[in-house]
Image: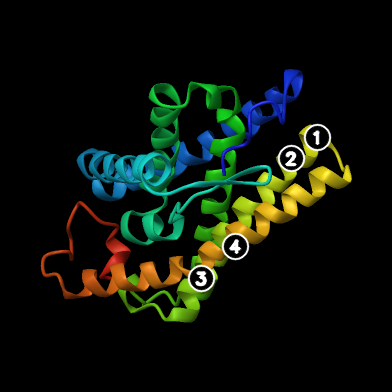
């Protein structure tokens, strides 16, 4: 989902920095809540895990240039369900930054747009989870339909933001619109895979003893009380 260098240029890059700063403020709010609930050690450990996972998603796992961007397996809903919203948001931002600093410096001018594209759909996923998952339901007990809804919300949000940045930077020309459409169609194929990954990870978590109360996962993973 990296925005291609040059697609948005000049002063227009400042808007991406502004949206990223707004997402960062909300992430700080989530982090403060998580800090009070589980402590600094837990937040730091889960954020480190999310950072390592994000770096793996972007740098190591297969990724393909399609249309105006690239198709990655980000697995944002998986990070959310295992680690919680705040660690997932911190990890997505830091993992993307590390990748840019050490392996793709040409992506750094687009960092604000890219981090917005990752984080805002995560916040939307969090809001959707609060609506479709009953208060007394642990994440390990989610149905396929719920996992699909969360994955679709996240991946759809990523596609929507990439489309927005492409239109913002290059306009509504036929070639640009066609490239956006091609990217969106390819990227949404991830939705066919991510819910299955979510359910497999949740099923594995359900069989593991000791996760209840563990500082390495979100409390909601196995205990909704």
| Camera-side residue of 113 and 166 | 166
Q: Name the residue under label 3.
A: 192
Q: Which of marks 2 and 3 is nearer the N terminus?
A: 2
Q: What distance separates the C-alpha of mark 3 from that of mark 1? A: 30 Å
Q: Which of marks 3 and 1 is nearer the N terminus?
A: 1
- Disc 4, disc 3: CB below 8 Å? no
| Camera-side residue of 58 and 132 | 58
Instruction: Give the class, few, some or many, for how many residues have Cα within 10 Å of label 4's Cα (few <14, many ≥20).
Output: some
Q: What distance separates the C-alpha of mark 1 from that of mark 4? A: 22 Å
Residue 53 in view of the camera? yes
Q: What distance separates the C-alpha of mark 2 from that of mark 1? A: 6 Å
Secondary structure beneath dot 1 equals helix
**Visual colour scheme:** rainbow
Q: Name the residue under label 2.
A: 166
The relative height of residue 49 versus residue 194 in the rendered view (above or below) is above
Residue 200 rendering spot, x and y as whole percentages: 31, 72
- Disc 4, disc 2: CB below 8 Å? no
Residue in the picture at 53% in, 66% down: 191
Secondary structure beneath dot 4 equals helix
Residue in the picture at 58% in, 39% down: 116
Secondary structure beneath dot 2 equals helix
The relative height of residue 170 versus residue 35 in the rendered view (above or below) is above
The relative height of residue 54 versus residue 159 in the rendered view (above or below) is above
Q: Earlier in the sequence, mark 1 or mark 4?
A: 1
Residue in the picture at 28% in, 39% down: 48
Identify the disc placed on residue 170. 1
Instruction: Give the class, few, some or many, for how many residues have Cα within 10 Å of label 2's Cα (few <14, many ≥20).
Output: many
| Camera-side residue of 3 and 32 | 3
Secondary structure beneath dot 3 equals helix
């Amino acid at each position: 989902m990296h925005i291609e260098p040059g697609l948005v240029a000049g002063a227009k890059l400042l808007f991406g920095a502004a949206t990223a700063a707004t997402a960062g403020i909300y992430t700080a709010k989530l982090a403060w809540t998580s800090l009070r609930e589980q402590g600094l050690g837990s937040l730091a450990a889960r954020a480190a895990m999310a950072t390592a996972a994000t770096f793996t998603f972007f740098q190591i796992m297969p990724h393909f240039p399609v249309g105006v961007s690239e198709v990655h397996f980000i697995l944002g809903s998986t990070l959310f369900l295992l680690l919680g919203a705040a660690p997932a948001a911190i990890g997505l931002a830091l993992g993307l930054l590390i990748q840019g600093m050490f392996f793709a410096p040409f992506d750094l001018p687009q960092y604000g747009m890219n981090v917005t594209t990752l984080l805002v759909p995560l916040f939307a996923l969090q809001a959707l989870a609060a609506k479709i998952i009953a208060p007394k339901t642990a994440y390990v007990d989610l149905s396929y339909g719920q996992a699909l809804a969360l994955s679709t919300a996240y991946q759809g949000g990523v596609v929507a933001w990439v489309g927005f940045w492409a239109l913002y930077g290059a306009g509504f020309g036929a070639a640009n619109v066609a490239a956006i459409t091609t990217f969106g169609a390819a990227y949404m194929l991830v939705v066919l895979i991510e819910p299955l990954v979510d359910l497999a990870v949740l099923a594995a978590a359900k069989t593991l003893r000791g996760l209840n109360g563990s500082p390495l996962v979100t409390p909601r993973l196995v205990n909704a009380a």
